[in-house]
Image (cartoon, grey):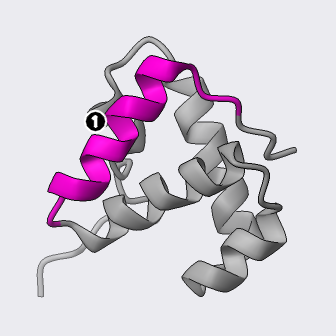
Amino acid sequence: MPGVTLNSKERRELEEWVRSTETASVLRRVQALLWLDEGASAEEVAELLFVSRAGVYKWVRQFQERHALDVGNRVAEGAPGGRPRTVQ
């Protein structure tokens, strides 16, 4: 699945995010997308970033599903899943 094909504008914006982001999780997502666009496999990217292949697939899916948003919002983390916290 993770064949990512970025257009020149997306690639340029992602490369800018690599230089400017201070958030490690966003940097990993951006780097993964850039490497996939260059032809790396999901397995290679997962190994380089110490994440699962499923995580790489999720990042690609979210990036593609959020196509109407700007690049910053496309690579941002989504809302956390699971059960909400309870008051102790």
Please report the bounds of the magenta region as a residue range: 5-22
Q: Is residue 26 left or right of residue 54?
A: left
- Observer-nearest of 7 and 76: 7
Identity of the amino acid at label 1? Answer: Gly
Could you tell me which residue is drawn at 66 percent across and 61 percent down? 56
Q: Main secondary structure of the magenta part?
A: helix
- In the image, residue 39 lies at what x, y percent? 79, 50
Would residue 38 be counted in the magenta stretch?
A: no
Could you say which quadrant of the image residue 48 lies in? bottom right
Q: Is residue 34 left or right of residue 68?
A: right
Q: Is residue 32 left or right of residue 29?
A: right
Is residue 84 visible in this depiction of the protein?
yes
- In the image, residue 20 lies at what x, y percent? 15, 54
Asked if residue 51 is positioned above or below residue 60 in the image, the reply reads below
Give the structural element (helix, strand or loop) at label 1.
helix
- In the image, residue 11 lies at what x, y percent? 47, 33
Asked if residue 51 is positioned above or below residue 82 in the image, the reply reads below
Q: Which residue is mark 1?
A: 72
Task: Name the quadrant of the N terminus.
Answer: top right
Count of number-bearing discs: 1
Is residue 83 visible in this depiction of the protein?
no
